């Protein structure tokens, strides 16, 4: 208010007497009354003789005060409404951040659950592999040791054959007969493989460890992840009151 002369437009209209609008119809008449019927300011001559002679009029100052209060109330209401609008926008922005944060967190949780499920299967896979490996090694060890026994036996037999061939060349009859006795005994012994284990049919089979996961796979495929989630999902609502409370919920859960 210390720059009173600087800006005349900030002064109230009635103080600017020299700028009071004049009547278009009645020359020299100021617009100084208000026609309530038509809702327009007009001049006294218009009320007495002119267009507003049958109208209800009020002093312009009282209508000025009324309208000023009305406009002031309207401005206050708009300011309040704008504040609420700004509040809603802030809540919407906060809700958007919360949605992104919640989505990220939920994805992490879901992935952890899946990882746990994988680990259950991994554990089972490891257990089964260990069991198969144990039997595989046991059987292979047994077969290897049996192979060694057969090789030893074969080596022994080859020696006997060699000795037999050498003995065949012996022309000295007494010497031949001396050598032949233990040799024939050896041949008789060697021809029997009764002391060597026979591998039973299908010993090399490992297919008793097969697994059938048809039921399990079907059960996994039947998990309706999306449908289970939709039932618990709050619907968006057009009511700001409900929106406030739901975004409040989101906010509180996001802060935990
Ligand atoms: Zn007039
Ligand atoms: Zn009128």
Image (tube, grey):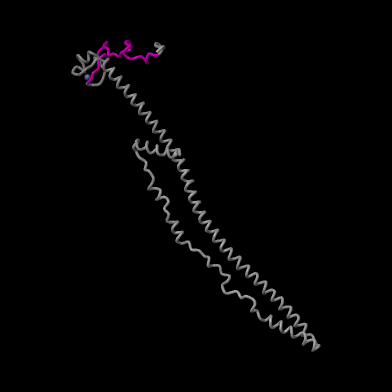
Residue 129 rendering spot, x and y as whole percentages? 56, 61
134 w.r.t. 74: above or below: below
| 19 is higher (above) or lower (below) than 188 | above
Q: Is residue 20 magenta?
A: yes
Q: Position of residue 131 (x, y in %)?
A: 56, 63
Q: Residue at x 72, y 77 (%)?
A: 156
Picture residue at 52% right of the left edge, 54% below the top: 119
Quarter of the image for the N terminus: give it. Answer: top left
Side of 178 relative to 39 (left or right): right
User: Which residue is at 41% across, 34% downward?
Assistant: 91
**In which quadrant is the C terminus drawn?**
top left
Q: Which residues are magenta?
A: 7-36
Residue 25: give x, y in percent of width and height.
25, 15
Query: Which residue does the image show at 43% across and 51% down from the upper left?
Result: 225
Count numbered badges in the picture. Answer: 0
Q: In the image shown, does 223 or 89 lie closer to the viewer? A: 223
Indicate the quadrant where residue 171 lies.
bottom right
- 148 or 58: nearer the eye? 148
| Residue at far bottom of view | 173
Of 16 and 46, the residue lying toward us: 16
Q: Residue furthest left?
A: 54
Image x and y of residue 148, in percent: 67, 71
- Tell me if 192 is positioned left or right of 26 in this view: right
């Amino acid at each position: 208010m210390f720059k009173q002369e600087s800006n005349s437009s900030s002064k109230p209209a009635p103080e600017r007497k020299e700028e009071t609008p004049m009547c278009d119809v009645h020359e020299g008449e100021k617009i100084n009354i208000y026609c309530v019927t038509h809702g327009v300011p007009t001049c006294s001559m218009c009320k007495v003789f002119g267009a507003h002679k049958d109208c209800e009029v009020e002093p312009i100052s009282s209508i000025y005060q009324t309208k000023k209060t009305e406009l002031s109330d309207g401005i206050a209401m708009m300011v309040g409404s704008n504040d609420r609008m700004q509040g809603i926008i802030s809540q919407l922005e906060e809700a958007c951040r919360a949605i992104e944060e919640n989505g990220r967190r939920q994805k992490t949780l879901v992935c952890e659950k899946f990882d746990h499920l994988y680990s259950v299967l991994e554990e089972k896979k490891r257990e089964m592999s260990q069991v198969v490996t144990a039997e595989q090694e046991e059987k292979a060890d047994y077969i290897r040791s049996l192979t060694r026994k057969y090789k030893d036996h074969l080596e022994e037999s080859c020696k006997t054959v060699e000795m037999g061939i050498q003995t065949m060349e012996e022309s000295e009859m007494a010497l031949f007969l001396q050598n032949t006795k233990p040799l024939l005994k050896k041949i008789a012994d060697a021809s029997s493989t009764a002391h060597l284990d026979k591998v039973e049919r299908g010993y090399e089979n490992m297919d008793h460890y097969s697994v059938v996961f048809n039921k399990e796979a079907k059960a996994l495929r039947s998990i309706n992840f999306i449908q289970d989630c939709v039932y618990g999902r709050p619907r968006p609502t057009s009511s700001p009151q409900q929106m406030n409370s739901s975004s409040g919920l989101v906010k509180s859960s996001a802060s935990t």
